[in-house]
Amino acid sequence: MRLLQQFHHITPTPNCRVEQRLVTRGIVLKDDRILLLFTERYNDFSLPGGGVDADESLHQALERELAEEAGARDIEILADFGIVEEYRPWYKNDCNVLFMRSYCYQCSMADELGAQQLEHYEQQNGMRPLWVPVAEAIQHNQQVMQHQTNSMGLSIVRETFLLQQIEQELLGQTVD
């Protein structure tokens, strides 16, 4: 799978311990709309997806995450889209840097969403699935990055980049 981008939110030093995390993200399009998660806490849109458990393949993790976060059913993974790598600050497991590799896939699914099965922190953050025009999601996230820097999460940078790539490559539109 091709590398789309690498973000350095923090630069690892020779003495730091780097934790690694594999993640999958799903791209589900219907016309010009995309299935996204809106998170009230951060006021942003993101692709559904999450961490790969030790006993899972990338595809199994993606199907599980789409079902849990968005209530997706009858999921079919259609094609590879690309990888985004990130070095992020991290404060768990006696580690100060997280290297996260996100594998992004184009998917299809049943039209109707089922019930979400969110983790406690996802519920607390007010995460809900929405069908949103891609351009609208990009514009919204860009506004948050310009005007709400104190309350936004680091993920918005990756998510906005991915939405722009999706708009350009899958919807054939020019990204400003």
Image (tube, rainbow, N blue to C red):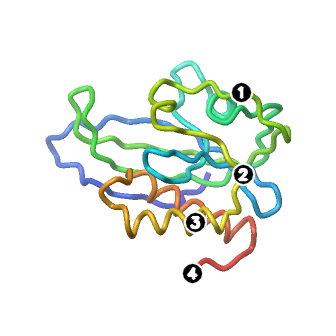
Residues at discs 4 and 3 in contact (Cβ within 8 Å): no
Task: Decide which of tag 3 and tag 2 comes sooner along the chain.
Answer: 2
Name the residue at 59% across, 67% down: 164
Q: Amino acid at mark 2?
A: Trp
Q: Which percent across, then down, holds residue 137?
A: 60, 62
Mark 3 is surrounded, within 10 Å at the Cα level, by few (under 14), some (14 to 19) or many (20 or more) other residues, namely many
Q: Nearer the viewer, residue 35 or 77?
A: 35
Residue at left 74%, top 73%? 172
Q: Amino acid at mark 3?
A: Ile
Q: Nearer the viewer, residue 69 or 150?
A: 150
For marks 4 and 3, the one nearer the N-term is 3
- Per the image, label 4 sits on a secondary structure element best described as loop
What separation in Å lies between label 3 and label 2 (alpha carbons)? Answer: 13 Å
Foreground: disc 4 or disc 1: 1
Q: Which mark is residue 138?
A: 3
Give the quarter of the figure containing the C terminus.
bottom right
Tag 2 or tag 1, which sits nearer the N-term?
1
| Image x and y of residue 125, in percent | 46, 37
Q: Residue furthest left?
A: 15
The nearer-to-camera label among 3 and 1 is: 1
Q: Which residue is mark 4?
A: 176
Task: Tell me the residue that label 2 is attached to.
Answer: 131
Q: Earlier in the sequence, mark 4 or mark 1?
A: 1
Residue under the image location 65 percent in, 42 percent down: 129
Q: Which residue is mark 1?
A: 115
